[in-house]
Amino acid sequence: MLTRRNVYVIVFVVSVIGLLVVQYQYLRVGLGLARVQFSKKIDEARENINSELSELNSLSYTLGSTIKKDTSELKISLDSLQRLSQFYLNDYISYQLGVSGIDAPFTYALYARDSTQYLTSLKPHVKNDDILMYPVKIEGYLPNLLNKEVVLELGFEDINKYFMSQLNGLTIPGAIFLLAIIVVVIWVLRSFYWQSSLITTTNDFINNLTHELKTPVFSIGLASKILEEGISPEKKPVLELIRRETDRLRKHIDKVLELASLESGKKIMQFTELDFKPELQRICEDFKTLSKYEKVDFDYELQGSAYPIRAEKFHLENAIGNLLENAKKYSDDPVIRLNAHIQKGKLLMAISDNGPGISQKDLKKIFRKYYRIKNGDVHKVKGYGLGLSYVHKIVSMHRGNIAVNSKLGEGTTFVISLKTSNNGR
């Protein structure tokens, strides 16, 4: 069975191979275009060379004297004349190739159609499959002087190396960028899996530690019940304080464990079809009863006769209770309203308060795990930044959506949207 890590590695390897194939194909296309461009430039150079050698000038006269082996008017030895002609013709060909934009190394041979060879380059001019040959049929002065067809043949060896050097401006940066991409991706993947392993280890440690904390919390709760018997009236408030704080600690531990199990995927949620209106009614009535003792102005309105949804009742109730508790905690004189109704096949539950509001910067982060809004450098309300992360997780697992509308100084409204069963009918 393929793991996610293996899938990432396979995708990365396939992508790199694909990039190499694409790079190779581009290189082939580039070499083909370079050959075509080279042929065009050679044709231009051949035309210029033929035009120059067809006329009587110093070069054609020197070549003619060398071929005829006539040194009477030049007054130099035949060997010197031949060497002079070799350099002279080599420089001329090099010049014409340069004018046409070619700086590749070459050799040449000047010969007649009857295979009589008159002049060659200093570097041996040989013919094989690795050398490109470009013959230039000379017209005018030299053929008339010899009464033969004269051909100047140009040869280019290692032409592929030349083409590659012309394409280095594309291939080398492409190879460097591809190598950089490979290095960066490997580094990112290693960092990602190292961090993932570290996070997993940290979460396991936190979960184990949290489980261990449940035992002393249970023992403290049991001991407080035993102490309740026969305790003096003046010590009862202290005992009640111990029991309240113990219950509070137990709730925090359960919340950490519940959120961790949901995020790890170890907890399977049991969804059932139900009418959620009676459950929401009960949540609101219980919260309203408590609000009377805590001087909280709470009211609610549940429109419609039924709220048929597919849900995990326990967690959805916890999520709504969490939003109500937050609305109470973050307001000095809490005024809380809950409104629920069905609209376009969705159950909408809005919880609003008159709290300090949330800035636009914080709105983007409030559902992150452990993120808490600060009041200056101090958190106004103590907590762990797990509540809204838990709510967002539960709503997402119900395939719903939670939206937040808030302005600083004007309160906050959370709206949970869940798809109804049978379009709300």
Image: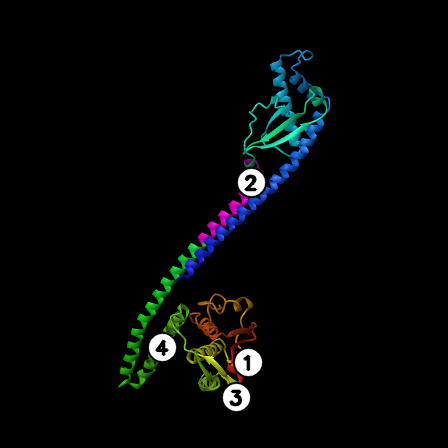
Q: Are marks 2 and 4 in contact (CB under 8 Å)?
A: no
Q: Who is closer to the viewer here, 170 or 186? A: 170
Q: Which residues are magenta?
A: 161-187
Residue carrying label 2: 168
Q: CA distance from mark 2 to mark 1?
A: 62 Å
Q: Which mark is residue 345?
A: 1
**Residue 398 as seen in the image, left or right of residue 51:** left
Find numbered disc 1 in the image and state the secondary structure of the residue it sits on. Answer: loop
Q: Is residue 154 magenta?
A: no
Q: Which residue is denoted by mark 4 in the rendering? A: 245
Locate residue 212, reporting x and y percent: 30, 70
Q: Is residue 338 visible?
A: no
Q: Label 1 is placed on what type of residue? A: Gly
Q: Secondary structure at mark 2?
A: helix
The residue labelled by disc 3 is 305
Q: Nearer the viewer, mark 4 or mark 1?
A: 1
Q: Are marks 3 and 1 in contact (CB under 8 Å)?
A: no
Measured in 3D between alpha carbons, the distance from the residue under mark 2 to the one under mark 3, in whole angstroms, is: 75 Å
Task: Tell me the crowding category of disc 3: few under 14, some 14 to 19, or many 20 or more residues within 10 angstroms, Cα based.
Answer: few
User: What is the spatial separation of the Cα atoms under label 4 and label 1, in whole angstroms?
Assistant: 43 Å
